[in-house]
Amino acid sequence: MNTGLKIATFTAALAATFGTAYGVGQGIGPVVADDPPKHGDDHTRPSSPPAEGDGHAGHDTPPAGGLQISEGGYTLDLKTPTVTAGRRTDLRFTVRDGSGRAVTAYQREHDKELHLIVASRDLVTYRHLHPTRAADGTWSTPVDLPRAGGYRVFADFTPAKKNAENLTLGADLAASGPYRPKELPAPATTAETNGYDVELSGALRPGKASELKLKVSRDGKPVTDLQPYLGAYGHLVALRSGDLAYLHVHPNGEPGDGTTEPGPDISFTATAPSAGSYRLFLDFQHDGKVHTAAFTVRAGGAAAGSGTPEGHADDGHGH
């Protein structure tokens, strides 16, 4: 998307609300800790990598998104607040304006009018979905969450209105079933997904723009023929552990601009709104399929990325 991958902030742990009858589950788009995903996308405009020391704390730090169900005169109306874990269900929602009317006109960003992210409260499950909009403004997409528990749904969009700003609205979603929460995977600098190895370098810094570089390889050889996906060679979503704040992550360059190559390196610029642990989800496309690699990083501490076997995403990207 034009605004770059925002790290939308996800609100308080839903799992606590559902108690032991629910479990933190995994999503249908890219799922972490299950099988690898099939698509990913980027909500941001391409930008150049920052120089060392670039970025400022305080008021220059981009706000986290997705913590509110209403913002800027728009409200996310989630019509399917509860699903059953392990059962394919149509997730339906509407974006309403200040008058309560369903929004039916959007700006296209990274080939889509709206990007939908579903993530479990423990950040082990992640889905990047592309719902379909009906004429009356109702969006829908099939979702199959493998584990019960609390999830956060993020709608990332820009209304087709003059001077409209990009918004990320968030709402809680519950998946019923036995509740078995998982701990956040430990930090590491490599991840494996569907036979691909991804290496993370760089650090995520609170209040300061920094470059994150990811290198993709397969069978020990660099992948140099990545395919564009949603206007870039890679899409990165960053979520803060604890409240699932959603951050904007900017890809550095875009296919055909003369500044980027189709691999093996994919570069992004990101700014963490605070110190803490974050989960990064990289979507990239190769041989016609989208794959997701997941990492845990700590901002304000050691420059580490994480990609454990649990961190690879499952094959469930929506369209």
Image (cartoon, rainbow, N blue to C red):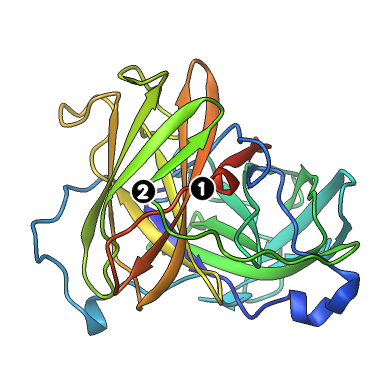
User: In the rendered structure, which amino acid carries the disc numbered 1?
Assistant: Thr
Report the side of 139 relative to 9 (left or right): right
Identify which residue is drawn at 54% across, 29% down.
290
Q: Is residue 236 left or right of residue 20?
A: left
Q: Residue at x 40, y 75 (%)?
A: 276
Tag 2, which secondary structure?
A: loop
Residue 193 pos. (x, y %) = 53, 34
Q: Is residue 166 visible?
A: no
Name which residue lies at 28% across and 67% down: 302
Quadrant in which residue 232 is drawn = top left
* Residue 265 seen: yes
Is 48 above or below relative to 246?
A: above
Residue 213, x across and y down, in percent: 27, 44
Residue annotated with mark 1: 308
Amino acid type at mark 2: Thr
Indicate whether 29 appears above or below 290. Answer: below
Identify the image quadrant of residue 315. Answer: top right
Q: Position of residue 256 (x, y in %)?
A: 24, 24
Q: Is residue 289 left or right of residue 301?
A: right
Picture quadrant where residue 53 is located: bottom left
Q: Residue at x 17, y 75 (%)?
A: 56
Is 1 drawn above or below residue 122 in the view shown? above
Are there few (<14), some (14-19), or many (20+) residues within 10 Å of tag 1? many
Identify the residue position indicated by label 2 in the image.
189
